[in-house]
């Protein structure tokens, strides 16, 4: 059973959540606007609310307003944070080139204001990965570790190791990927943040799938879905559940594969991702029929009927 899923790199942005990234994830920093400037504060607050509610287009528009205002005030820290936040939105919207330009501006302005650069460096690394520029990923991670202005925390270094692990998986270097996963686990220590745990679990799943340990892969992706749900990163759920369904199918556990794929389709449909939803519902139907599961067969058929009814 072969399906066209959201690329693993996109999951990195969501749940290195990014937050993305994530997810993860690469998400908006809480802005510290000039107290005397109400327009900047209101735009940043409204943008943050929109991003938190997954209204990314609206968040991007509001962060553009905040950035324009910050530039007018010539406040380096405010410009840096607004540019960073807007770039996080643009990454979610797959506008990688524009996001990378804004991240360069954010880094320049944050350096001017003597602010730590770790946040922007890790997001620059993620953006480079999404754009397929892995040589730049290495350069940004090197600066994260070596530039005294970066001031990375253990969490930043953990995220860097996870990103390097994803690149090792791209290269099918499973030994290196496992070493980087262990490095990330050691850095994380007792940290229990659901998004960070989701990042680690997703990398573990991908390594397991690449080394044909399909049971560990399935269980890890299912655990990642639980962590993302607990962290309110709902948009990332569908692809993770679909990966779990693929792994269950590799184990010939067709009823479980049908369940995961049906849930993936249902979730994707809820976010308006009709093409992926249709693909996964069709795969769920095929798996349900292989499992001779009448309930899941009917549910998958019903979902596909909904999609066809929604066509113009």
Image (cartoon, rainbow, N blue to C red):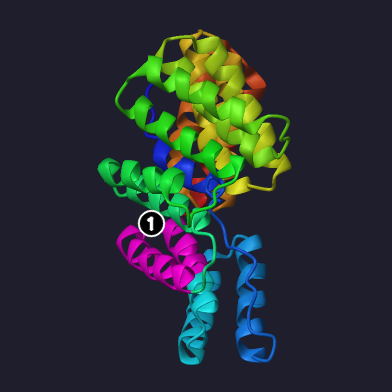
Above or below, 196 relative to 95: above
Counting from the top left corner in percent of width and height, residue 34 is at 64, 84
Q: State the image quarter where residue 210 is shown.
A: top left
> In percent of the image, x 55 and y 44: which residue is there?
156
Pick the front one: 77 or 194: 77
Judged from this view, the residue extending furthest toward the front is 148
Above or below: residue 136 compared with residue 68: above
Residue at 54% from the left image edge and 72% from the top image edge: 58
User: Residue 142's x, y, as percent?
Assistant: 38, 43
Of residues 173 and 198, the one nearer the viewer is 173
| Quadrant housing residue 145 | top left
Name the residue beneath numbered marker 1: 94
Q: Residue at x 47, y 41 (%)?
A: 12
Dominant SS of magenta comes to helix
Question: Is 224 within the magenta?
Answer: no
Q: Is residue 235 left or right of residue 71?
A: right
Segment tinted magenta in the rendering: 83-112
What's the residue at 34%, 44% (across, down)? 137
Secondary structure found at label 1: loop
In the rendered view, would you say 93 is above or below 49?
A: above
Q: Is residue 92 a member of the stretch shown in magenta? A: yes
């Amino acid at each position: 059973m072969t399906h066209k899923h959201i690329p693993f790199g996109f999951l990195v942005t969501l749940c290195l959540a990014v937050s993305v990234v994530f997810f993860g994830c690469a998400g908006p920093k809480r802005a510290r606007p000039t107290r005397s400037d109400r327009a900047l504060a209101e735009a940043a607050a409204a943008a943050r609310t929109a991003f938190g509610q997954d209204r990314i287009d609206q968040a991007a528009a509001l962060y553009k307003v905040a950035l324009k205002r910050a530039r007018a005030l010539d406040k380096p820290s405010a410009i840096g944070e607004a540019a960073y936040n807007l770039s996080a939105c643009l990454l979610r919207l797959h506008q990688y080139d524009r996001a990378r330009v804004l991240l360069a501006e954010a880094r320049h302005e944050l350096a001017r204001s003597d602010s730590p650069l770790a946040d922007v460096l890790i997001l620059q690394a993620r953006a480079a990965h999404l754009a397929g520029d892995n040589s730049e990923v290495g350069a940004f991670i090197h600066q994260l570790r070596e530039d005294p202005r970066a001031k990375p925390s253990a969490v930043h270094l953990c995220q860097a190791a996870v990103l390097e692990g994803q690149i090792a998986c791209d290269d099918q270097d499973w030994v290196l990927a496992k070493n980087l996963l262990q490095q990330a686990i050691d850095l994380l220590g007792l940290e229990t943040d659901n998004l960070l745990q989701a990042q680690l679990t997703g990398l573990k799943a991908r390594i397991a799938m690449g080394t044909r340990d399909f049971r560990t892969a399935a269980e890890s992706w299912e655990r990642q879905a639980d962590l993302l749900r607990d962290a309110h990163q709902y948009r990332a759920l569908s692809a993770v559940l679909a990966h779990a369904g693929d792994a269950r199918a590799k184990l010939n556990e067709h009823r479980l594969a049908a369940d995961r794929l049906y849930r993936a389709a249902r979730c994707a449909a809820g976010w308006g991702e009709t093409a992926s939803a249709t693909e996964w519902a069709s795969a769920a139907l095929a798996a349900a029929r292989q499992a001779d599961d009448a309930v899941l067969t009917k549910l998958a058929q019903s979902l596909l009927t909904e999609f066809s009814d929604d066509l113009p």
